[in-house]
Amino acid sequence: MTRFVLVAGTTKTARIDGISAAGADPDLVAHTPSADAELVEYGHLVRAPSLPVSPTGCPTPAAVTRAVRERVGFETLVVDAGLAEPTGAPTVGVGATPGRDIRETDPVPTAPGAWVAARELGSALPEDELVIGETIPGGTTTALGVFRALGVGSEGRGRGDAVGFPVSSSLPENPLDLKREVVDAAFEASDLTPGDAAYHPELAVRFLGDPVLATVAGLTAGALDSGTEVILGGGTQMLAAAALVRHAGVAAPLSVATTTYVAADVDMDAAAAALDCNLVVTDPGFAGRDDPLARYAAGEAKEGAGMGGALRLAERAGVTESVADGTLEVVERVNESYGP
Amino acid sequence: MTRFVLVAGTTKTARIDGISAAGADPDLVAHTPSADAELVEYGHLVRAPSLPVSPTGCPTPAAVTRAVRERVGFETLVVDAGLAEPTGAPTVGVGATPGRDIRETDPVPTAPGAWVAARELGSALPEDELVIGETIPGGTTTALGVFRALGVGSEGRGRGDAVGFPVSSSLPENPLDLKREVVDAAFEASDLTPGDAAYHPELAVRFLGDPVLATVAGLTAGALDSGTEVILGGGTQMLAAAALVRHAGVAAPLSVATTTYVAADVDMDAAAAALDCNLVVTDPGFAGRDDPLARYAAGEAKEGAGMGGALRLAERAGVTESVADGTLEVVERVNESYGP
């Protein structure tokens, strides 16, 4: 049996102007993880105000995950890793609260506790396979912080570097200079310098990361401890989670499943290989459409809410072909009830 | 689409000696709703310490509900209506906290708020049918309190009375005199006398009830408001919830689905008719077995965790026959992992 686990949280880091495209406007960004959780669980909104879209109207990848779920029928579990706004989705807690801005001195004080609680949870879940996804605006910035704190890879802009930090973005133009500035400021505010947190993953997530990364890493470590297979569904952030798991001394086989959009943007192969992870890349087939999903093919969103992991399950079940239409159906269903 | 909603909570009323059989010993009683939620969600325990059993070893009705789920495949939602112990099941909150002892002056201060939040939730859920169950130790005592506060029916010991309070019990010998004493003391501690809360259901649940009844009633009212069909799965407590809904002025069709064990114990027909509810009674077929399920046929447990509602779904799907073996399978699976 496979269970899809969505780890949902927020940080103040996401409020930095220009960091995140996970919302039509800045006030809606903090609602995105709560809304994503409802979409995956119900295929509808319950307490969230609107379907999350980017400023240009690209619909949330949670709609893709939901479309796959309506075809494959997997069970779900939403873990509250620091939600800031109400959700009608049922959640299990791990003691996480929303992260502060990583430029503050102790931005994620609940990270070590969340890691431990998530590890226990991951080890206790009865399924023999977990697919883990994330939804947290601003998550690639904190992932960059974690890569640098752990000293993983050499810094680079992605493709072309030996093993660069594969920091993708939900924006077509990756604001990588801004992300670097924010992470530089985070190091200044902490007592750490890059590489200081190697083999101390709890320091990396607490001072440079976010509560979602701590929770994903803890769940993964716990699941692997108990012999459960894990597929991390996502791009940059899931590689950061994998790095945290490896730096916690967990050597078991681990897969990362992402979309062609992330793989086209950054060098996932080399990074996955460096972390001893199996990489699976799936094309959702959104290219050439004349609807809002075409924005994915134009480089928006790319990943999120476990989209790459869900697509892996769709591929396994042989239903990938109907995912695009199914996603549009989810988007239209929600917009009919709530207005676009 | 049908969703099974389990409303789970606790009160200090359940700690009164002799009131509840929902636990092998008094210290485990508060864990029962948390464990029941895990059983329905996972078919396993995650954070709860052990499979809930009565003092004589009768397994929790949540194992029956889970067995049905493994055959019918319905989706679930656990609502936290005042859990006191950790659960690994994902839950959605309605602002409820554990109820105090109804002999205190304001035993369920969160009841009115939980009612409102549950009503909004019930109205927002997208399914066209909800089956609602409950798990709260001591729940038939607070149900008696609610019946009397609303002034529903005439007092009686069940079968043989015109429309008596159909107060069943998870114990083979119903401690009805003790329940009456506790409810009498609750009236003394409140400003209410029997019947005072007629058409003021929020007063009945707040001063004589429990947070689960408030939440079930709110969910039901909200679902009916939005045209969703509701089956209340349970006995005494679901009739109390139905009474609360009717006293809130909601007149829409409503069903109560219970087991033959409750129907053999108290006069459900007359009470359901008086509340303008459709009554469905299902026999899980546990009689004549030489395993722990035989205790049900001997009058233990009888109902709980939406068992009657789940059995209704099993009947509709034509799988009732395999529910008994499936239940035993769930019990054995859990005991293998955690010890009996």
Image (spheres, coloured by chain):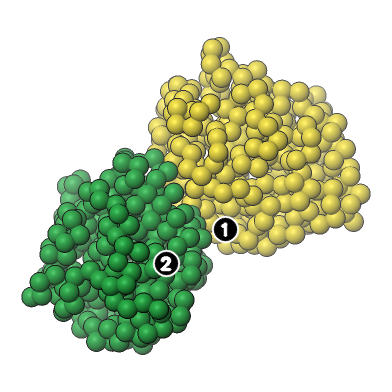
Chain colours: A green, B yellow
Q: Which residue is mark 1?
A: B93
The kind of residue on which mark 2 rests is: Pro
- Which chain hosts label 2? A
User: Which mark is nearer the camera, 2 or 1?
Assistant: 2
Can residue B228 be seen at all in this image of the molecule? no
- CA–CA distance in space, label 2 to label 1: 21 Å
User: How far across and how far down the image is residue A32, in percent?
Assistant: 40, 71
Discs 2, 1: same chain: no
Instruction: Give the numbered dot on residue B287.
Output: none
In the image, is B102 to the left or to the right of A212?
A: right
The kind of residue on which mark 1 rests is: Gly
Identified at 78% across, 53% down, the residue is B107
User: How far across and how far down the image is residue A50, in percent?
Assistant: 42, 72
* Mark 2, other Cα within 10 Å: few <14 / some 14–19 / many ≥20: many
**Towards the viewer: B240 or B93:** B93
Q: Is residue A86 above or below residue B161?
A: below
Identified at 44% across, 31% down, the residue is B337
User: How far across and how far down the image is residue B75, in percent?
Assistant: 43, 45
Q: Which residue is mark 2?
A: A211
User: How far across and how far down the image is residue A69, in percent?
Assistant: 31, 52
In the image, is A20 to the left or to the right of B226?
A: left
- Which chain hosts label 1? B
